[in-house]
Amino acid sequence: MRAKYLPAIFILLVCGTPAAAVIDFTNFHTPAQIDSELTNLAATHPTIAQIFTIGTSVEGRPIRGIKISDNVATNESDEGDVVFVGLHHAREWISAEVSLYLAEYLLTHYATDASLQACMNNLEIWIIPVLNPDGYIYSASSSANRCWRKNRRNNGDGTFGVDLNRNYSFQWGLGSGSGGSPNTYDDTYRGPSAFSEPETTALRDFVGTLQNPKAVVSYHSYSELFLRPWSYTTADPPGEPTLAFIAQNNISRIAAVHAHTYSETIWYQSFGEATDFFWNETRLAGFTPELRPASATGPGSCAGFAPFPTEIIPTAEENLPAALALIKDAGCRILWIKDHNTDNGVEPSAVWTGSGWSQAFWVSPDIWSVPAPPLTAGSVVTLNVRVHNDSATTMNGSTVRAYYTDPRVALEFPNPAAILIGQQTPNLAPGDTTVSFSWTVPTGTNIWGEHHWCVGAIVSHPDDRPLTTQIQRSNNIGGRNFETTEALTSQNLTVAVTNFLEVPAEYFVTVDRKTLPKGWEVIVPRIPPRAKPNRKALLLGVKGNIIEPGETIVQPVRVVVPPYSKKGEATDIHVSGVLVPLVPGKRIPVGNGYTFRLLLGADPTYPKKEK
Amino acid sequence: MSTRRNQLTHVAVVLFCLCLLGSATVYTQNQRSETRSQKLYRIEVEDADEAALIEQELKVKPELVRGRSFYYYGNENINRRLQEFGYHPSVEDADSVLTRVVRVVGKGTEAPLREIGLTIVLRERGYWIARGTLKQLRALSRAEYAIQDLRKGEPYPRQVRLTVTKLSDVSDVVAPRIDIHTVQKSKEGFVVFGGAFDESLDELRAMGFKVEILPDPPGVTR
C-alpha cells in the first residue's frame, strides 16, 4: 500500500507543493460567484494578480477579468500578451468555468512550477471569464431563460439581444441563420451594425491597447471542437499551416488527458466572428475551443449547453494543457532564428516607428546560401538555416521549413504565394544547428521582372510553435533576400506591395536612407491618386496610398548614384513598409521589407539634359 | 339589436387594437426618444467596416445596417456632413423600414397576416408571433386582429432535430435557417440539433426535410 504512493510522494517532493486550489468546481458558479471568485483570487495573489475591467455591458455591468503577471501592477510593454475570454454566449456557462479554472491553476502553480513561472514572467495573461455578464445573469435567472445566448440589448422592436460572436466587423452581415441572422428575434442576431455592442467593442479596444499581443482564445460550448480561422469560409486563411499546426497539436494535448478528441471542423460558416477579426487584421492567433459535451446530453432540453456539473472539472482539466502550451509558445523562447545581427531573441525584433521599422528584420544572419549571392539563375545552391536551441535538451521532432517568394512589402511566412523549398524534421540539440536545403534558384524573374527572391524559414516544435506569420513578431520565423546577377546591375528597381489582408489598407513604403553611401539617393515616385477615392480612407482622414484586398502594386524606384561612382561599387538598399488596415478601432500595422544589393554593373548613367 | 350589438363589438375591437398599436408605437418611440423628432434617412455603404467607420468618425449611429443600406435618424447638419464624404442621404419612411415583433391575437386565419406581408415567427395556440413594419401592423389592426407586446422572454425558439444526408446541406440549407447547436454523424447522415422559428421550419419542410420538434426547456410556456 505504501509502495503504491511512493511515486506520487516523490513527484511532490521534487516538484514542490502547489498552493492549494480553493475554488469548488463541482457545480456551476452563479454570475455573482464567478465575480467574487475572481476578486478572491486577486486578493490571495496580490503580487501576481490584479482585477481589470475592459468596459461595461449594454446594461451597464463591468466586464471584469484577472490579469496575471509578475510586476502585475505595471504594464510591461516588452512582455507578450495572451488573452483568454469566456462566455460570449450567455448559455455557455462552462466557458466561464474553464477560464476561472485556468486562472486559479496559473496562480496556484506559479510559485512551484519553475518552467511555468519562467514563461509567465515574460507575459501578461488576461483572463476574462465572462464577456457577456448581462446575458449570463439572464440565463441564470430562471430555467426558462437557461438557453439564452445573446446579450441583453433592447432591440427596440419588442425583442432583446445581439449575438456577440456575430457582431465583429470582419465579414459581418454576410450570412443568415447560424452564420449571423438579420432577424432581431433569432438567437444568432448579428446586431443592427458591426460592433454595435459595448461588449464586442470593449474586447476589440482592449486587445488594441495591448502592446505585444500573442494569442486570443475564445471559449465556447459545445460539441468538442477546436476551431481556428476562418469561420466565414471554408477556404484557408493566410498562414493556414501555422494555425493548423497549433490547432492539431492542441487537439492531441486535449485528447491526452481524458481521451476526448476534439474535432477541427464545424461544418458551417459564421460571419462577424471574433477570431476571424483578430487574425485578419493583426495576424493575432485566435482559437475557439467548443467545450464539452460532444453531443446534446445533459439535464433538460437545453441539453448540451447545460451539461451535467460533473463535466466541469474534466473539461477544464483537458483544456488546460492546450492553454498552457499557448502560454509557453508566447512566453518562452526555445527555438529561434535571428532576424538581424543584434537580434537577441526578444519579440518583436523591430517595431514600426511611424516612419519606418526600428531595425531591418528581413536580413537574418541565420539564413545564407553556398555559394553566396549573387546567385546564378537556375543553379542549385545550398540554403542553410541556423536554428538556436536555448533549452538544455534536444528538441526531437522539430520541423524546419523554407520558402521562397517574390519580395514585397508586408510579406508574411507562410503565405499563400510562397513556394516551399523544403521541409526537414531534425532533432535540434542544445545550441546551434544548421539545417541545409537544396534550392534550385528560379531561372525566370519574379512577377514584376526582377531576379530577386525572398526566403523565409520557420522552425516549429510541438513545444514551441509560431503564433503569427509576422517575422518580427515571432522568433520562430526568419527572412532574408537573395539576388541573382541580373538584379545587381540596374539602377531601376521595383518595389512591390501586396495586400494579403482581406480589407483595404493604407500603405507606406520607406527607404532606409541612413544606410546609403554618401551621395546616393533613392527616388520613390509618388503614385497618382486613384480616380475614385476610397471612402473608408476619407472617413479616417487617411491621405496615403491605398491598396485593396488582394491587390499588388508595383512601384518603380530609381537609384541615383553620384557621378564619381564607378562600376563595381555596391550597397544594400533597404526598402520596407507597412499596411495599416482601414478598419474601425485601433489600426495595427503589419509589414515587412526587403533589401536590394545594388552593384554597379557599369559606370552610372543619367538621362541627357534637354538643351 | 343583435346586429347593432355586433357593430358595437366591432368598433370596440378596432378601438382596442388601435390602442394596443398606439401603445406599441409609443413604446418604440420611447426607445428612440432622442431621435423621435428626426427623420429616418438612408445612405449606401460598401460593407460593415464602412458603416462602423461612419459611426466612429462622424458619430452617426446606425439605426440599422441591412445589405448596403445604412439607416439613421438624422437632420440637415448630419446630412450635410455625410454629403461632404460623398454620401447621398435619402429620406425613408420609418414605418415602412423598421419592424416590430408582436403577438397577434384574433379568430381569423393566418392568410390575412401573410397577405399584409407579416413574417410568421411562431404559430402558437391562440396567437401568432409575427414581425412586420408599423405600416403593416396598422393594416393588420384594421383587419380586426389584436396586437400585443411580446411577453418577457418571447419569442422562444423551438428546439429541433433534423437529419440531412449530405454534409453540404448542413452549411447550405440548414445553417442559414437554424441556430445550430451541434451536428452529429449518424448512420443516416448528419443529425442537426438547433433552435429555430416557424418561418424557417416552414421553409425546411417545403424543401422536403423532416423536422422534429423537441420539448422546450423547463419553464418555457407558450
Image (spheres, helix red, strand yellow):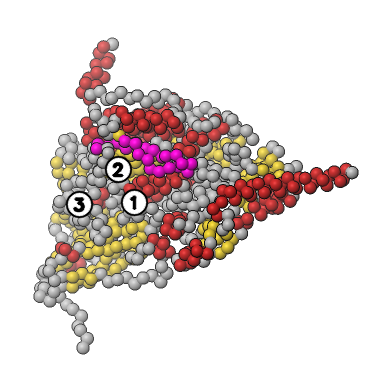
Q: What distance separates the C-alpha of mark 3 from that of mark 2?
A: 21 Å
Report the residue at 55% width, 39% height from top. B195
The picture places residue A304, in percent across and down from the top left corner, at 49, 32
- Quadrant containing the N terminus of chain A is top left
The picture places residue A175, in percent across and down from the top left corner, at 50, 50
Query: According to the image, label 1 marks what residue?
Result: A282
Task: Provide the secondary structure element on which disc 3 rests.
Answer: loop
Is residue A601 visible in the rendered image? The answer is: no
Going by the picture, which residue comes out furthest to the bottom?
A611
Residue A65 is covered by the magenta coloring: yes
Task: Provide the secondary structure element on which disc 1 rests.
Answer: helix
Is residue B59 placed above or below B11 in the rendered structure? below
Callout 2: chain: A
Query: Are both tags, 2 and 1, on one chain?
Result: yes
- Quadrant containing the C terminus of chain A is bottom left
- The foreground one among B152 and A427 is B152
Within-10-Å neighbours for mark 3: few <14, some 14–19, many 20+:
many
Report the residue at 45% width, 37% height from top. A133
Query: According to the image, label 2 marks what residue?
Result: A81
* Magenta highlight range: A50-71
- Tell which circle, 3 or 1, labels the residue nearer the N-terminal end: 1
Query: According to the image, label 3 marks what residue?
Result: A339
Task: Provide the secondary structure element on which disc 2 rests.
Answer: strand
Within-10-Å neighbours for mark 1: few <14, some 14–19, many 20+:
many
Q: What distance separates the C-alpha of mark 3 from that of mark 1?
A: 20 Å
Report the residue at 27% width, 59% height from top. A354
